[in-house]
Image (tube, rainbow, N blue to C red):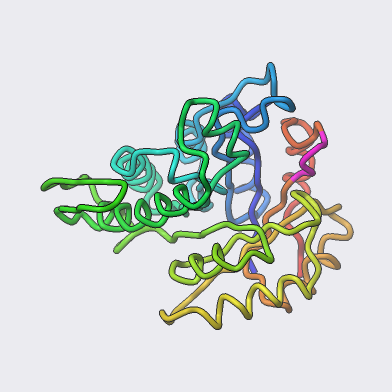
Amino acid sequence: MRFSVNVPNFGDFADARAVATVARAAEDAGWDGLFVWDHVVHNKAARRGQPFGDPWMLLTAAALATSTIRLGTLVTPVARRRPEQLARQVATLDVLSGGRVVFGAGLGGPVEDEFGSFGDETDPVVLAERLDEGLGLLARYWAGERVDHDGPHYRVRDVEILPATVQQPRPPVWVGGFWPARRPFRRAARWDGVVPLFASGHGEPPTPEEVREVAEYVTEHREATGPYDVVVGGLTAPEAAADVVGPLAAAGATWWDERGRYTAPELYSLPAVLRRVEAGPPRL
């Protein structure tokens, strides 16, 4: 079992220095990773007036402040980005960090706010197609291939995106989705990990039964062999964290992602997050 800290890219964490501070504290306290959100406006009604930071700039600051922890987004909406630009951002961070990037991908949302606000596509079927096609392109770019591609949403002519990532053939790709919808989890089975969200909401730990269902479903649909991550999370008190996380590890979780409650202001408060980070990860 590995342990990560999760912060949004708004509020106090719009400031790259705050993210670097949390990253350094997490490494010092024995956490294994730091993951940030990837939003432009998130929920406009809830976030009106709050600053946002670019996740790749935030993670660059975190990389420069650390030497061992894994770094990445949970999750990047690939359909909102140009694959070639995203490939270069991720590869640059992977090189800078010495191969410590994990790439979290998903559909993204809220769709009307994050996509519709800018005149972009809001049909989830089309966005899912762009996600799948984009992930395929990213994998080829990260491997340093010369790419030619004719797809329904992207066309590429004789392009190499260099440097390739340090991790070869690519960084680990984790795919997010809301359980019990099945299609996102069949997509996740084709990659290196799954990041399920549940009806209980962001910040509320899932039940062992929910984690077991996800792990069994993804295993059933996997064709590749080798390591695979099941990433779940929530908010724990340090003195009770092991009691929460232990049963989830037994149910198949491989990462515990410490994350604040969606509606609580502590979610984007540097002092609140630092207090929990400095107390250290759960001790199983």
Quadrant where the N terminus sits is bottom right
Query: Left or right: 158 with respect to 140?
Result: left
Compared to 231, does 220 lie above or below? below
Question: Percent position (x, y) of residue 181?
Answer: 64, 64
Where are the magenta residues, as a range? Answer: 260-264
Residue ID at (55%, 48%): 75
In the image, is residue 261 part of the stretch drawn in magenta?
A: yes
Residue at 66% x, 48% y is 5
Residue ID at (52%, 39%): 122
x%, y% of residue 131?
Answer: 43, 52
| Residue 120 magenta | no
Q: Position of residue 48 (x, y in %)?
A: 69, 20
Where on the picture, by quarter, is residue 209? bottom right
Identify which residue is drawn at 59% across, 56% down.
Answer: 32
Expressed as whole percent of the image width and height from the top left, the position of residue 163 reads 23, 46
Q: Is residue 160 left or right of residue 225?
A: left
The image quadrant of residue 182 is: bottom right
Q: Main secondary structure of the magenta part?
A: loop
